[in-house]
Image: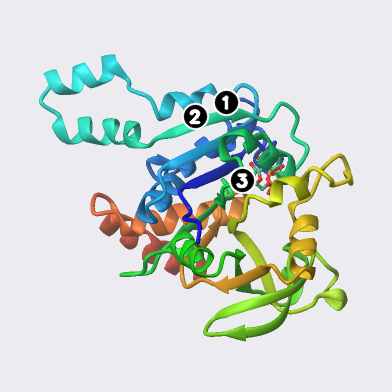
């Protein structure tokens, strides 16, 4: 069975929910505490043993490339000042093996994936949406690592899912499940953001996938709707052929492409910080008292 050694991070969306900051700053560079969101995703991949990564960026996103390159003047200064810990933090971002490809026009997630085809060929690949953070629980190996294991033992494409209820059902791609075995579900159909009454289940698609390379030829046949081509259309085709699996994740998930999700990710990351965690905890407790009153 083929091994999963490559990954695509689509990060070329317009980020309109975060205007005006996304006019000049690409959304993947928005910080959660002191790191851009895209660095957390690179760390997730590193933990899963996947280090051949393609980030799909929008035109004018050179700042992302700069983040993953050396900053010689800064590094020299940190060494000269004896600030070795900060030097290591600055250098760490150069340790990721990453390539960039530009998506000239934001024509949808499927369009972004097609931009990376020449780097992937017909290999299987991990797909991690640039605006979702998945943080493993204590001792957990992480979502993408679990999906990689499922692909490598079955040879079938696999997507991560979580349970959603009420109005949230219509915010996500929705999965129809044929059967489940040991936490791994066979997917029968996919519908994109259904009305609650049309939903196939309470299982929503979240932004982690391991896909077989055959998806590229399927993506090329897609017809645009609202100027975009949709990955979910090809996933539905795979599901109907009996070639798509799904698996729930135990990880904490933050939708950092959404304002509320972004703030939650920042607060929770700050609470875990050895540097400022205690101060922020006291502040959150004091704030909760204040707003309750
Ligand atoms: P979204 O549609 O959720 O995000 O795309 P967006 O378009 O960036 O943001 P809004 O909705 O305008 O605020 C999901 C993921 O797919 C990527 C995005 O960068 C995001 O990580 N994407 C989307 C692309 O890379 N290219 C596209 O054409 C569309």
Label 3 or label 1, whichever lies nearer to me, is 3
Residue 199 appears left or right of 112: right
User: How far apart in space, not on screen, are marks 1 and 2 (Cα)?
Assistant: 6 Å
Locate residue 111: give its quadrant.
Answer: top right
The answer to whether the beta carbon of the residue marked 1 is less than 8 Å from any atom of ligand 1 is no
Residue at image position (60%, 40%) is 121
- Residue sitting nearer the eye, 23 or 193: 193
Q: Is residue 273 above or below residue 85?
A: below
Locate residue 286: give its quadrant.
Answer: bottom left
User: How far apart in space, not on screen, are marks 2 and 3 (Cα)?
Assistant: 27 Å
Which mark identifies residue 61?
1
Q: Is residue 68 above or below residue 157?
A: above
The picture quadrant for ligand 1 comes to top right
Mark 1 falls on what kind of element? loop
The answer to whether the beta carbon of the residue marked 2 is less than 8 Å from any atom of ligand 1 is no
Residue 234 appears left or right of 38: right
User: How far apart in space, not on screen, are marks 3 and 1 (Cα)?
Assistant: 27 Å
Locate residue 177: give its quadrant.
Answer: bottom right
Pointers 1 and 2 in contact (C-beta within 8 Å): yes
Q: Which residue is mark 2?
A: 64
Label 3: few (<14), some (14–19) or many (≥20) C-alpha neighbours in 10 Å = some
Task: Identify the mark nearer the N-term, 2 or 3.
Answer: 2
- Residue sitting nearer the eye, 293 or 84: 84
Label 2 or label 3, whichever lies nearer to me, is 3
Residue 79 appears left or right of 19: left
Pointers 3 and 1 in contact (C-beta within 8 Å): no
Label 1: few (<14), some (14–19) or many (≥20) C-alpha neighbours in 10 Å = many
Task: Identify the mark nearer the N-term, 3 or 1.
Answer: 1
Q: Farthest left residue?
A: 82
Q: Which residue is mark 3?
A: 122
> Could you tell me residue 74's position as x and y percent?
27, 19
- Residue sitting nearer the eye, 224 or 156: 156
């Amino acid at each position: 069975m083929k091994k999963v050694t490559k990954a695509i991070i689509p990060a070329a969306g317009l980020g309109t929910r975060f205007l005006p900051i996304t006019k000049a700053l690409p959304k993947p560079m928005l910080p959660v505490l002191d790191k851009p969101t895209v660095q957390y995703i690179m760390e997730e991949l590193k933990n899963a043993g996947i280090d051949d990564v393609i980030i799909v960026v929008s035109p004018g996103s050179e700042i992302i490339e700069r983040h993953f390159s050396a900053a010689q003047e800064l590094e020299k200064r940190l060494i000269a000042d004896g600030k070795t810990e900060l030097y290591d933090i600055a250098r760490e971002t150069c340790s990721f093996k990453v390539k960039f490809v530009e998506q000239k026009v934001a024509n949808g997630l499927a369009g972004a994936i097609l931009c990376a085809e020449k780097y992937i060929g017909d290999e299987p690949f991990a797909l991690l949406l640039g605006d979702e953070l998945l943080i493993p629980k204590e001792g957990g190996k992480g979502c993408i690592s679990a999906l990689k294991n499922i692909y490598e033992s079955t040879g079938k494409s696999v997507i991560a899912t979580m349970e959603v209820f009420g109005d949230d059902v219509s915010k996500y791609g929705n999965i129809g499940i044929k059967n489940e075995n040991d936490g791994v579900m066979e997917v029968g159909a996919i519908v994109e953001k259904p009305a609650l009454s049309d939903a196939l289940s309470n299982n929503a698609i979240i932004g982690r996938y391991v896909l077989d390379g055959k998806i590229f030829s399927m993506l090329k046949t897609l017809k645009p709707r609202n100027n975009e081509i949709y990955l979910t259309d090809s996933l539905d085709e795979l599901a109907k052929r009996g070639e798509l699996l799904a698996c729930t994740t135990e990880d904490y998930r933050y939708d950092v492409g959404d304002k509320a999700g972004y703030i939650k990710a920042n607060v929770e990351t700050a609470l875990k910080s050895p540097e400022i965690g205690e101060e922020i905890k006291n502040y959150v407790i004091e704030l909760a008292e204040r707003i309750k009153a």
